[in-house]
Amino acid sequence: MKLRVFVTLKPGVLDPQGEAVRHALGALGFEGVNGVRQGKMIELDLAETDADKAQQQADEMCQKLLANTVIESYRVEMA
């Protein structure tokens, strides 16, 4: 079963990479970009065929490794 995990910084957490991208877009002539938040997307291909169990496995992976839950949020989607 294929899943996608989207990890983003929680609101209020500074995002220096996002700010660098926003600045670079302005330098390239893209005006009106007031903010950029950067994250990551992770694709998982699990052997599990039960959707609920796959979701549970992905949640556990996020809690233990894929996301720093102190400063990041995540969501899991079926791919």
Image: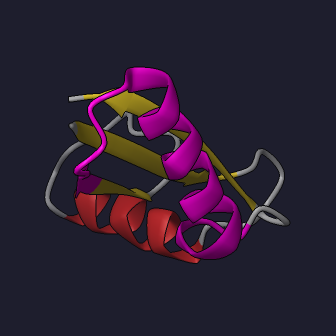
Q: Give how far across and how far down residue 74 sits, in percent.
A: 59, 45
Q: Residue at coordinates 56% horizontally, 52% vertically from top-left?
A: 8
Q: Which colouring convention does the figure follow?
A: secondary structure
Relative to 33, is 39 above or below?
A: below
15 up-or-down from 56: above or below: below
Note whether 45 is above or below 70 in the view shown: above
Main SS category, magenta section: helix
Q: Is residue 32 magenta?
A: no
Q: Is residue 50 magenta?
A: yes
Give the residues drawn in magenta, as a range. Answer: 43-68
Q: Is residue 67 above or below residue 39?
A: below
Q: Quadrant of residue 78?
A: top left
Q: Residue at x 63, y 56 (%)?
A: 60
Name, please, the residue furthest toward the left. Answer: 28
Q: Quadrant of residue 23?
A: bottom left
Picture quarter with the C terminus:
top left
Q: Is residue 63 left or right of residue 67?
A: right
Which of the 4 image quarters holds residue 16? bottom right
Residue at 42% x, 38% y is 54
Q: Left or right: 29 with respect to 58?
A: left
Q: Is residue 36 visible?
A: no
The residue positioned 43% from the left and 45% from the top of the image is 6
Q: Nearer the viewer, residue 1 or 22?
A: 1
* Residue 58 pos. (x, y %): 49, 49
